[in-house]
Structures are given as C-alpha cells and as structure tokens.
Image (spheres, rainbow, N blue to C red):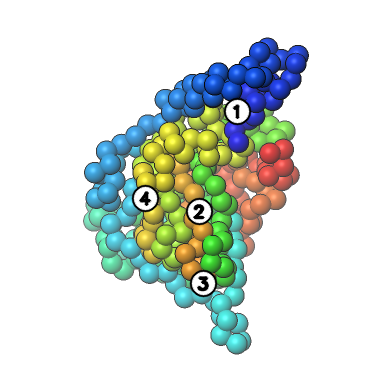
C-alpha cells in the first residue's frame, strides 16, 4: 500500500488527526482515496497502443528490438547441471561493438551479434553474453567508450515463483538513498536507457508509458503498485517473449512475473552510463578493474522501506 493511502487510513482512526472526522464515513474515505489515485494517473504518459503491438520504436519509454536473440548455454558442473550465476550491476567498458566497420556502415545488423571485441570487455564467466551485449550497444552509439552496468542472473526457478524482484515498479527510486541529500540524487537518470531480456517467455511484463514527475508518486525503491489501474492494468502491459530484448527508461513500469513453468532462467540487463547511484552492498565489482562512474552508496538499499 502506498504511504499516502496508509496515512489517510491511519489519520481517519487517530482522534488527534483532522482526518478523524471521516472515521465513520467510509464513503467519504473512498472518495478521498479515489481522488488521490486520479491525481497519480495524471503523471502517466501514454503512447499509441497500435505502435506498441507492432513492436516498433515509440515516443515514450519502451522499444522491443525486432529480432529475438538466442541466449548462451549456461555454465555446467561436472555432472552436467547448470551452475547458478549472479552478477549484479557490474561496471564494464561499453566498447564500439564493430571496430572492423566504419561508423557510417553501422546499421544495427540482425546477424553476427557475437563480437570478440565486445567479449574482451567482459569477465570470463560473461564472455558468452557478448552477442547480446553487442546487440544492445549497436543501438546506443553515444554510449561507446562509457562505463555501463551489466546484470546476469542465472538460476533454477520453481513454477509460480519469480527470479527477480516482484511487484510493479520503475527503476528510478524517486528519492534520495538513505543518508544522501535530495540535492545529491533527486532523479536517477539513464541517458541511454536500460536493456532487459530473458530466455524464458512470459516472465517479464512492461508497459508502454512513462511515469512523469515520478518523485511525487513512487513508493520505496520505485514501487508503483498503486498505479496499476492508472497505467491500464495488466492488459495494457506487454509480456516479453524468450530472447526478446526490450529497451526502456528508468521511468518505464515493469514487473517480474511468476514463472509459468519450472526451469533454469537466464536474465540479462544492461544499464547505460548516466547512473546516479551504485549500491556497493548489492552490486558486483568488476574483475577487470572498471570502476563505477557515479556516486557509490554504502548500506542496504532495502532497509527503511
């Protein structure tokens, strides 16, 4: 429940609160909460539904690359069992993905994604993801040479469970991390956006809209579960297929879905350079010595929820 709704309900039950006049007037309380929710809806920027369904570039916060890409084989132990891997927000150098071509010839090709040049920028356990990384980097030439952040999460997930953080949210927290001034980090801005993909279909849902002035309406760590109706409900979201690479912004609503069947899920995320805060306790340092180019925040970000 969003903190604002909690305050309204608690206030109605507290004699010293001005809201206590609504203690026995449930109709009035419902009206107040409805008006608050309607005000939140004004912060949602929508785009053309037909454009979204055609998987074409759009104007708001979502774009699905035209061609799905196969995920690499997982690492195996001596018994042939997939080995879990969890690398989170590891800094790496976003190199020019096609050094053998002049920039004028780069037209985001749909073949030969895997590039040994990109693999050199990744640690040994992630070199197999060079193909997917290259596919993303070809879309953001302004990011070449900058420090980006890669996440790879590979693990067995039971049916009905989620591998990643559940709940509807955006990546921007909308407020300063604990112990930081609001002047230090009022907005987490990702210039080139965020790329996400999974080898499992229907395990991630995204919405073709943006949450504007998000600092006014998001909950802890970007929670927007209270805005589900305002963004059109589940029906308005797009469920990603296996290998589909989705580009989105830090204000694009998305959520992990319960896995439709048990299996070994591989999740990939690439965050481009203009990240405002890197959470040291939750992130993976680079084995290649690449340092994050942003504020480093210490402590557990999930506290003070």
Gap in angstroms between the C-alphas marked 2 and 4 = 12 Å
Q: Is residue 140 visible?
A: no
Q: Is residue 145 left or right of residue 161?
A: left
Is disc 2 surrounded by few (<14), some (14 to 19) or many (20+) residues within 10 Å? Answer: many
| Residue count near mark 1 (Cα–Cα under 10 Å), binned few <14, some 14–19, many ≥20 | some
Q: Secondary structure at mark 2?
A: strand
Q: Residue at x 46, y 39 (%)?
A: 228
Outermost residue, right direction?
16
Mark 3 burial class by Cα count in 10 Å: few <14, some 14-19, many 20+? few
**What residue is shown with label 4?**
238
On screen, 105 above or below 79? above
Query: Which numbered disc covers residue 263?
Result: 3
Mark earlier in primary sequence (2, 4): 4
**Residue 59 drawn above or below residue 43:** below
In the rendered image, which residue does mark 1 sit on?
5
Q: Position of residue 84 (x, y in %)?
A: 60, 71
Q: Residue at x 71, y 22 (%)?
A: 13
Q: At which x and y percent is residue 4?
A: 61, 26
- Which is nearer the N-term, disc 2 or disc 3? 2
Element carrying mark 4: strand
């Amino acid at each position: 429940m969003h903190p604002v709704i909690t305050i309204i309900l608690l206030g109605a039950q507290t004699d010293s609160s001005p809201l206590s006049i609504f203690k026995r007037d449930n109709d009035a309380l419902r009206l107040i909460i409805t008006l608050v929710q309607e005000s939140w809806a004004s912060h949602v920027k929508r785009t053309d539904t037909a454009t979204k369904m055609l998987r074409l570039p759009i104007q708001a916060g979502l774009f699905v690359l035209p061609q799905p890409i196969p995920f690499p084989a997982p690492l195996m132990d001596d018994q042939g069992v997939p080995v879990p891997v969890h690398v989170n927000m590891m800094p790496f150098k976003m190199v020019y993905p096609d050094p053998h071509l002049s920039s004028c010839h780069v037209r985001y090709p749909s073949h030969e994604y895997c590039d040994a040049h990109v693999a050199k920028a990744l640690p040994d356990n992630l070199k197999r993801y060079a193909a997917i990384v290259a596919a993303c980097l070809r879309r953001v030439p302004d990011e070449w040479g900058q420090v980006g952040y890669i996440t790879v999460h590979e693990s067995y997930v039971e049916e009905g469970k989620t591998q990643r953080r559940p709940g509807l949210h955006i990546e921007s927290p909308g407020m300063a991390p604990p112990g930081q001034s609001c002047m230090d980090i009022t907005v987490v801005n990702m210039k080139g956006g965020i790329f996400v993909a999974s080898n499992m279909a229907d395990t991630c849902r995204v919405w073709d809209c943006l949450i504007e002035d998000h600092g006014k309406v998001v909950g802890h760590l970007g929670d927007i579960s209270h805005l589900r109706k305002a963004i059109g409900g589940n029906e308005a979201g797009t469920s990603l297929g296996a290998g589909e690479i989705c580009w989105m912004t830090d204000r694009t609503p998305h959520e992990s879905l319960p896995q439709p069947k048990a299996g070994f899920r591989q999740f990939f995320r690439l965050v481009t350079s203009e990240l405002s805060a890197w959470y040291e306790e939750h992130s993976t340092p680079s084995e290649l010595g690449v340092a994050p180019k942003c504020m480093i925040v210490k402590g557990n970000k999930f506290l003070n929820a």
